[in-house]
Amino acid sequence: MSKKAHQDLIIIGGGPGGYTAGIYAQRAALKTVLIEKGIPGGQLNNTGEVENWPGTEKISGSDLALQFSRHAAAYGLEMMNREVVGVEPGLDHHTVILDNGESLSTHAVILATGGSPRKLGVPGEDRYYGRGVSYCAVCDGFFFRDKTVVVVGGGDSALEESLYLAKLARRVYIAHRRDAFRGGMILQKRVLNEKRITVLWNTVLAEIQADEQGVNAVTTKNTLDGAISILATDGVFIFIGFEPNNSLVPAGTRMNANGYVITDDKCETSTSGIFAIGDLKEKYAKQIVTAAADGCTAALAAAHYVEHKKSGYGQ
Ligand code: NAP
């Protein structure tokens, strides 16, 4: 295992929180590297239009992601396109292990790994993934022009992505397990006013069916009377929330029952020098703007932590 130069701060994850942390870390003159395994932006790339980033009335998720990474690059932030496979905390320094076997030592770590789409767990979901089953309207919506799709969920993501799909598909059904949406009022109104969208209240999916061409129907169940129906569809888009990507959280670090990391008001976890931000962290509002705010808080707190560490070494 080879070792690289010691860092003040390593940020893992290149979403809104990670890039904001990078910008603030550069402004605080911390020797920092941001490591991202995929394309810049994380979940932002799966988002159609962003309309609640202050100062910008409307921007596509991928364009906003690009702006974040360009802004961080303009500050000279070092970025590495690799997968992190482990974070080992230590008393003197922490170690970040990469998929190529290299390890990096650092005073502080900011975990900005976000979340991944939650799965429904119904028959056909895994089998027909990529053949009609999708978790990303921006990525796959194009394949359903003038077709019929079923969206599952009732939160902001399901509503926002249904509106996106309604611009492409002939008919969009939203199957929601209750009789009221969880998502915000503005989105609810838009969805209920969109002629191409039909809401199936109190409805869950029991199975996804397909033929050689891909998905062709879903079996639905009414949650009130148990009635089973078959609904013909070309695609199924599932937006039922996220699971935190917590596999890199060091053992013993406090998390809640759902796997979200518990932090103090400086975004520091119960493991000293390890910070958690954005959708990985337990908090009330999971928004781009709150992820960015976490990034700022964690970077400023990390700067303080690193300064303290260095003064302890007499540097
Ligand atoms: P969410 O708010 O947790 O909503 C998940 C939805 O899926 C709920 O309606 C839930 O039903 C339903 N659901 C969960 N498990 C299910 C299951 N097994 N079977 C059927 N339905 C199920 O998730 P989200 O919409 O992905 O949003 C995540 C966070 O990001 C939220 O804080 C949201 O506000 C935020 N977000 C914000 C924006 C924006 O501001 N523009 C956009 C996207 C996301 P119940 O309602 O019955 O629980």
Image (spheres, rainbow, N blue to C red):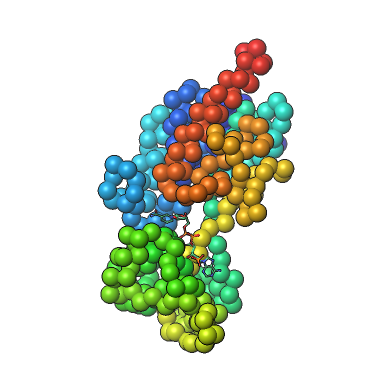
Q: Quadrant of residue 181?
A: bottom left
Instruction: Tell me the quadrant of the picture where the N terminus can be found.
Output: top right
Q: Residue at x 57, y 56 (%)?
A: 243
Of 20 and 45, the residue lying toward us: 20
Q: Residue at x 60, y 30 (%)?
A: 108
Up-down relation of residue 48 to residue 212 (above or below): above
Outermost residue, top direction? 314
The residue that appears at 43% across and 49% down in the rendered structure is: 287
Quarter that holds the C terminus: top right
Does 185 appear above or below 110?
below
User: Is residue 214 in view from this perspective?
Assistant: no
Q: x%, y% of residue 206?
A: 55, 79
**Front residue of 279 and 66:** 279
- Residue 107 appears in the rendering: yes
Residue located at (42% from left, 78% from top): 200
* Picture coordinates of residue 83, whole percent (x, y): 58, 45
Total numbered badges shown on the rendered structure: 0
Q: Is residue 7 above or below residue 221?
A: above
Horizontally, is 115 left or right of 259 in the view? left
Q: Quadrant of residue 72?
A: top left
Residue 31, x across and y down, in percent: 53, 25
| Residue 178, image x, y percentages | 48, 72
